[in-house]
Amino acid sequence: MKLTKSLVYFLSVLFLLSLSSFAQDDKEMTEDEWQAEMTRLTGQKQSLESEIKTLTADIENLTTVRNGLQDPEDCIDELYALVGATRKDVDNFRNAVNELDGKIKRKNLLNYNFVFYKIFLYLGFKIMSVQDFMLC
């Protein structure tokens, strides 16, 4: 039992050491490569920092613009006041237009149905007369 425990501990330590050796990169950087990488990363850091500054300035500008804007509901009320109407007047007008549009559509539908019915009857009689002719 003691031998199996020590064997398990030994194998687990060996496994952990092998994992750490796999995690390390086999290739070491030379000093010139390291310096080039550091220069590249420093340049990238500086460009990202400048981008952060410009974005922060844009956010501040947009915040000041937003704070200076009027409430959209107030703008709509002012627009209605220019034409001498209120929200209730506009809603009543919208309902009247929708009702009138519905009546027009219903009448057009009835007219279209009547026209289609007449065409159907005409074609039906033509087909029947052709069939009668062919049977003779």
Image (cartoon, rainbow, N blue to C red):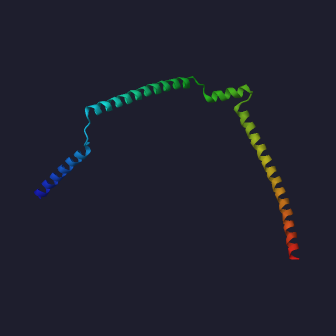
Residue located farthest toward the bottom when viewing the structure as drawn: 136
Q: Looking at the rendering, which quadrant does residue 32 occupy?
A: top left
Is residue 69 placed above or below 3 in the rendered structure? above
Identify the residue at image location x=50%, y=26%.
58
Residue located farthest toward the left when viewing the structure as drawn: 2
Residue 92: give x, y in percent of width and height: 74, 37
Q: Nearer the viewer, residue 10 or 82?
A: 10
Is residue 56 placed above or below 15 in the rendered structure? above
Identify the residue at image location x=38%, y=27%.
46
Count all numbered tags in the image, as a single digit. 0
- Looking at the image, residue 9 sits to the left or right of residue 104; the answer is left
Identify the residue at image location x=86%, y=76%.
135
Identify the residue at image location x=32%, y=31%.
36
Residue 60: give x, y in percent of width and height: 49, 24
Q: Nearer the viewer, residue 3 or 87?
A: 3
Is residue 24 placed above or below 128 in the rendered structure? above
Is residue 103 placed above or below 90 in the rendered structure? below
* Location of the N terminus (image quadrant): bottom left
